[in-house]
Image (cartoon, grey):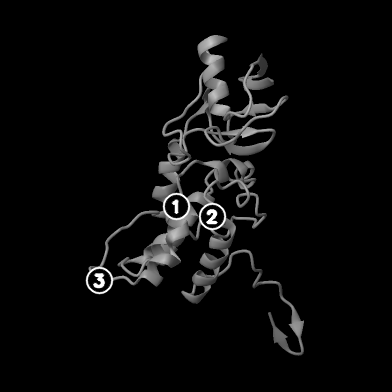
Amino acid sequence: MEITILRGEEAHSYNVELENVTLLSVLNNIKTKIDPTLTYSHGCRSGVCGSCAVRVNGREQLMCEYKPSDGDLVEPIRNARVIRDLVVDTSSIERFNCAGMGWSESFKAENVSAEEMERIETQSDCILCTSCFSACPVYAVNPNFIGPFALTRVWRYVNDPRERDSEAKMGAIQINGIWDCTLCGACVPVCPQSIAPMQDIKILRMKSGMLGYPDPTMNFGGGFDLGGWDF
């Protein structure tokens, strides 16, 4: 089986005699037996930590779960500075989470029903693998976009009945946040946890409207004349 890895500006091809194994096993084989200079990231090997995300044939995958085929092209995730080979700088995760306040600010001490916890269970499973971040086309025009993974985390906390100040989080995602998303859906199929960030962003938009935040994509100054009414 031949695997091609994009390393900087050059594509390096490797032949390995392995079948029905994960991409991580293939890269470990290459590093230990063929090319010790190959650099990549991994952690839990169980699809939990999210540190081994890469792109395979143009789609985001976790190396510890994906089983490669002959001719596969492996490259680092997009929208992040490449440090070396398949290793990228993921410091933007912390920066965007801070911008969106994607954490618990202050919990109220109260009992929460199983139904209420089930409502936020899926979003709680985000492993910050950056797959949706890599697939998102918005970064091509707005590098300050808070991003689908951070917005999903905001959704999780503003819907937690124990959160004291969910409105502050809603205010934090109005700029470079929910309204910058194109709702293209590219983030949905690449999530290894089956989270749908696009749907979460839609709900956050509706919640914003209920709180009185205007939709900046709407043109309220068009000057339309409808039967004496100016819009």
Identify the residue under disc 1. Answer: 125
Instruction: Name which residue lies at 67% across and 21% down.
Output: 4
Residues marked 1 and 2 touching at CB (< 8 Å): yes
In percent of width and height, residue 197 lies at 55, 56
Q: Earlier in the sequence, mark 1 or mark 3?
A: 3
Which of the two residues, 119 or 186, is positioned nearer the viewer here? 119
Query: Residue 146: in sight, yes or no?
Result: no
Q: Is residue 156 left or right of residue 224?
A: left
Element at badge 3?
Answer: loop
Residue type indicated by callout 3: Glu
Q: Is residue 40 above or below residue 45?
A: above
Which of the two residues, 162 or 102, is positioned nearer the viewer here? 162
Distance (Cα) linking label 1 and label 3: 22 Å
Query: Residue 17: in sight, yes or no?
Result: yes
In percent of width and height, residue 205 lies at 54, 67
Residues marked 1 and 3 touching at CB (< 8 Å): no
Q: Is residue 49 left or right of residue 140?
A: left
Identify the residue under disc 3. Answer: 110
Distance (Cα) linking label 3 and label 2: 27 Å
In percent of width and height, residue 100 lies at 43, 54
Q: Is residue 198 left or right of residue 11?
A: left
Residue type indicated by callout 2: Ile
Q: Quadrant of residue 227?
A: bottom right
In percent of width and height, residue 188 lies at 61, 52
Q: Tell me, for residue 195, which label it has, or none.
A: 2
